[in-house]
Structures are given as structure tokens and as C-alpha cells.
Image: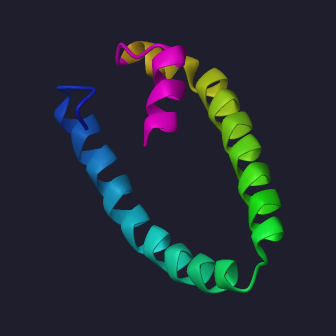
Amino acid sequence: CEGTQDALLRTLFAQIGDDEEGHIAFHCVFLRDAWGRFTPSQRWVVFTAWQLFFQAVCLVAAWDHRRALAAVGLSRRRFVGDCQAI
């Protein structure tokens, strides 16, 4: 919501964020249980694969949403950097 002063966009982004909270909570519980069953070497493989997949998704999202990002004054590089920081 911080990227725009537009009231409609701020409301929309807040609603999306609220909707995602439950979704993320569910996955945290599920993944915590699944993670505990992996050996350390399996955890390393899964973690590395997730990191690579995450990077790819960030790049695709930045390219696909380039016009929306530009409209709110956010560069694709900054978007990817912010995703990584989170």
C-alpha cells in the first residue's frame, strides 16, 4: 500500500494482503510439519530449489507486471530487490 496514494489501489492492495494472511498461515503450518520429516541433505536440496524457483518467479512477475510497476513508480530491479528482502 505504501507505493501509491491512490485510495482505490490502497484499498485493493489492503484487501489482497488480508486475503493472503490466511493462505500464508495455512502453508506455514503445512510446511513446518513437512520440513520436520526431511533429512538435513534433503532440506538443503529443497531450500536451494525453492530459492531458485523464487528468483525465477520474481523475474517473471517483474517482467509481466512492468507497466503496473512503472505506473506506481517502482522499477523492476527494485521490485525484485524488495521481494528478496522480504
Q: 56 or 14, which is in the foreground? A: 56
Q: Residue at x 75, y 45 (%)?
A: 53
Count up the numbered dots: 0
Q: Residue at x 35, y 55 (%)?
A: 17
- Considering the whole magenta stretch, tell me its main secondary structure: helix
Write down the quadrant of residue 52 in the picture: top right
Q: Residue furthest front?
A: 40
The x, y position of residue 10, in whole percent, is 23, 39
Q: Nearer the viewer, residue 15 or 63?
A: 63
Q: Position of residue 40 (x, y in %)?
A: 75, 71
Q: Position of residue 60 (x, y in %)?
A: 70, 30
The quadrant of the image that shows the C terminus is top left
Q: Which residues are magenta?
A: 72-86
Q: Is residue 67 above or below residue 10?
A: above
- Identify the coloring: rainbow
Q: Nearer the viewer, residue 64 or 49?
A: 49
Which percent across, then down, holds residue 26? 50, 79
Which residue is pictured at 28% across the width and 36% down the height? Answer: 9
Classify residue 71 as left or right of residue 77. left
Residue at 17%, 26% in the rendered image: 5
